[in-house]
Amino acid sequence: MSIPKTQKAAIFETNGGKIEYKDIPVPTPKPTEILINVKYSGVCHTDLHAWKGDWPLDTKLPLVGGHEGAGIVVAKGDQVTNFEIGDYAGIKWLNGSCMSCEFCQQGAEPNCPDADLSGYTHDGSFQQYATADAVQAAKIPKGTDLAEVAPILCAGVTVYKALKTAALTPGQFVAISGAGGGLGSLAVQYAKAMGLRVVGIDGGEDKEKLFKSLGGEIFIDFTKTKDVVTAIQEATNGGPHGVINVSVSPAAISQSCKYVRTLGTVVLVGLPAGAVCESSVFEHVIKSIQIKGSYVGNRQDTAEAIDFFSRGLVKSPIKIVGLSELDSVYKLMEEGKIVGRYVLDTSK
Ligand code: 8ID
Ligand code: ZN
Ligand code: ZN
């Protein structure tokens, strides 16, 4: 396979600065890395946070963002034994970890203090050729639609793991706060596949329509509902047993501690800048609720989440646009106007 010397990428020099679509060198894989010809990359809200510099964790600069990249292995380092040229591979958020700390040792690799992150501390999938750690790169079955599998690599894995963290049983209610966005639209489907009854909270008719088409049962429009807490509790006869928070709203996150059912579990996933989750200590104790954080997933969660997709249990509600249009995707995302997930075609 001939690998060019230069390639197109979306790159920025400073947080919040201009996103340039331009030619940059094709990176060379280290002995432990593969080089992936990225065909499609999902745009996660995390990429927007990274560009804006929202979090108390520095990005590398200049940075090529992106961590939902799906493509084909075109080169590999001489220590790589688990991928062959021509295999399908995925770039996900966790690109590497130390593999020897107490967290890595128990399979909690995303929680490693030395984690290397695609599209954050390592140039990611908003380019035509990207390097990835061979241990952490996702295995994608040959013949998979690379545009549709892309969002599974972060959004899918993350919500699948968050639902496991909620530890619900079939027939129970789960609320997805932010149900019409990238993570939310996949969470609805993973939850359904797990036998849960799904309540969606988001704003606007397009999001409601998508939610219903994905098998969601009860939709609460936060832009039209005066008392969201009471509406959710009434619709679920006492509140959902679990809540997956994938909105980018601190108020919505704190609200979920109010409407969750007694003995229920609130899972924190969305990461609004500077957010604090407020829970009344009195209610927290009397209702004996749990609040848990959930951060992407490990290699096993990734394999399982892709397997649900491969078996047709979840579908990616995507809209494909060119890599050159990343800045306009960020604009729509900031305004909360994205229904489902945008995926970038790296050839345009
Ligand atoms: O591992 C993790 N914890 C992880 C992994 C991946 C992504 C965390 N995230 C984080 C992202 O960084 C981001 O903060 O999850 C959040 C959601 O990512 P996304 O799904 O990629 O974002 P989106 O497509 O913009 O969807 C957000 C949805 O929230 C809705 C919006 O309308 C949109 O559909 N929303 C908002 I903003 N305010 C709401 C409210 N008050 C709301 N929905 C309900 N109530
Ligand atoms: Zn992500
Ligand atoms: Zn570690």
Image: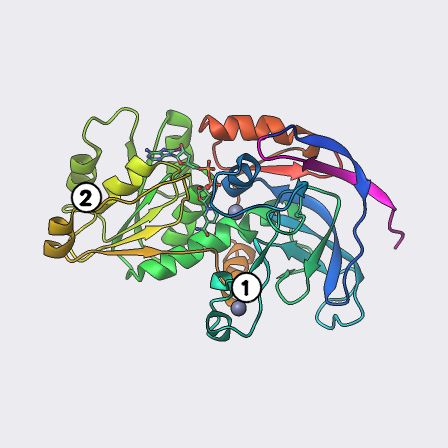
Give left or right: position of 125 versus 224: right
Residue kind at label 1, given as amino acid type = Ala
Which residue position holds label 1? Answer: 303
Residue 111, compared with residue 23, is above or below; it is: below
x and y, in percent, of residue 92 in the image: 59, 54
Q: Between 70 and 6, which is closer to the camera in this rendering?
A: 6
Dot 2: within a 10 Å radius of its alpha carbon, few (fewer than 14), some, or many (20 or more) residues? Answer: many
Q: Between 52 and 344, which is closer to the camera in this rendering?
A: 52
**296 part of magenta stretch:** no
Residue 193, compared with residue 215, is above or below; it is: below
Is residue 86 in view from this perspective? yes
Between the residue at mark 2 and the residue at mark 1, the CA separation in whole angstroms equals 34 Å
Which residue position holds label 2? Answer: 258
Number of the front mark, 2 or 1: 2
**9 part of magenta stretch:** yes
Give left or right: position of 306 versus 248: right
Corner quadrant of residue 218: top left
**Residue at x-position 54% and y-position 64%:** 303
Span shown in magenta: 1-16
x and y, in percent, of residue 54 in the image: 48, 38
Instruction: Residue lying at the far right in this picture: please name it.
Output: 2
* Residue 200: assigned label: none
